[in-house]
Amino acid sequence: YNWLAARADVSDTRIGAWGISYGGGAIFNSLVAGVPWAAVVTVETWTDLYSALMPQGLVKSGLVAGLAGSIPPEKRDPSLTAVQDAAFAGNSAAVRPWAEARSSLSKLGAVTTPVFMAQGRRDFLFGIEQASLALQRLRGPKLLYLGLHGHAPSTFPASDTGSLMTQVRAWFDCYLRSGACARVPGVSVVPEGSSGPAPWNASLPKTTTSTFALPGVMTFARSGKTVRTTAPLRKAIEVFGSPTVQVSIAASGGWSRLVAVLTARTPQGREIVVSAGGVPTKNGARTVKIQLINQATFVPKGSRLTLTLASASTAQSTSNLLYLDLPMEASARVRVGTAVLKLPGLRTPVTK
């Protein structure tokens, strides 16, 4: 900002910012730190780093390892190694303040800058809530575009990126060039497979909840798992939000975590990873509730949903590296009983 403001040919009151992933998080943090951007655009990023990377106190170990490994040693904050070790050890008390210092959500209520957020429908690193919670708090003009781009399992660019960037340019033209902009509705949800614009609406779409009971009892060790599958769906569900899994468990021998992976197999035989999540556990019998990643996924009619419960997401597939198979006591065992899966879905699906 200072570099641009120092130029004689740039107006100090018409400087904007665009950032993706790390860059988007930096822009949000700069906003709450007082950098006077005239308008910003953030893409597939975070506002609350703790809830994104260590939801419910269990670190997304595979994703965090990938992020840390992508940073050149000379660019790493000296605290990163220690906080990563703390996260992998389940020490949320050490991680939370570190993440809060790099988060903007709690301070966004004071921001009046125009903000255009482009979050991914299916982004297992930074879920929809990272933008939807910001949408609630921001006090200036704001838009939330839920598109096909994102971190894995999505990509950037995606099929709708051209349409997105056209709208981004219009946003900047409005606030950086003309300075006089009509207020518009705030949320657009792009259908899966689309390459064009989607309608804008005043708020997030309404959802309804589908509930599936998945009975059974199974005891297993760290390398084991239990797999539960539903009957074919009688109608399509466009999952929108954070599914939950409530399950009774009895842990012993130092069993320390339970990971849930939700997949769908379509009538054509295609497997979709819908979402995943996990919670730390302690010895003893209890009921746990696992919140899965907040995302939007279309599941066709006739698909079967499968819930895999284990100590790591790799139990569902060796290529699923969300939650790694971290060390656990050799004596660790868990008995898993009936699970109840609740799926939030769009009342009116946008994908056909």
Image (tube, rainbow, N blue to C red):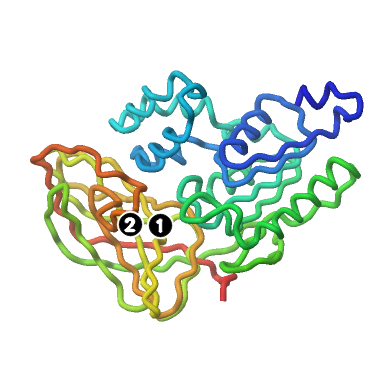
Amino acid on which disc 1 is placed: Ser
Residue under circle 2?
261
Q: Quadrant of residue 133?
A: top right
- Where in the figure is residue 97, as x and y percent of width and height? 45, 24
Q: Residues within 10 Å of mark 1 (few under 14, many from 20)?
A: many
Tag 2 near tag 1, CB within 8 Å: yes
Q: Which mark is residue 275?
A: 1
Residue 335 position within the rendered picture, expressed as x and y whole percent measured from the top left? 14, 53
Q: In terms of secondary structure, where does tag 2 sit?
A: strand
Looking at the picture, tell me which residue is in the foreground, 7 or 102: 7
Residue 218 appears at what percent x and percent y?
13, 59
Q: Residue at point 33% right, 39% down?
A: 58
Tally of numbered discs: 2
* Earlier sequence position, callout 2 versus callout 1: 2
Q: Secondary structure at mark 1?
A: strand
- The answer to which of 187 and 149 lies nearer the viewer is 149
Seen at 34% across and 48% down, the residue is 321
Name the kind of residue labelled 2 in the image: Val
Question: Looking at the picture, does residue 348 appear above or below residue 46?
Answer: below
Q: Is residue 102 left or right of residue 177?
A: left
Q: Residues within 10 Å of mark 2 (few under 14, many from 20)?
A: many
- Which percent across, then down, holds residue 167? 75, 55
Give the number of the disc on residue 142.
none
Residue at 83% across / 43% down in the picture?
A: 175
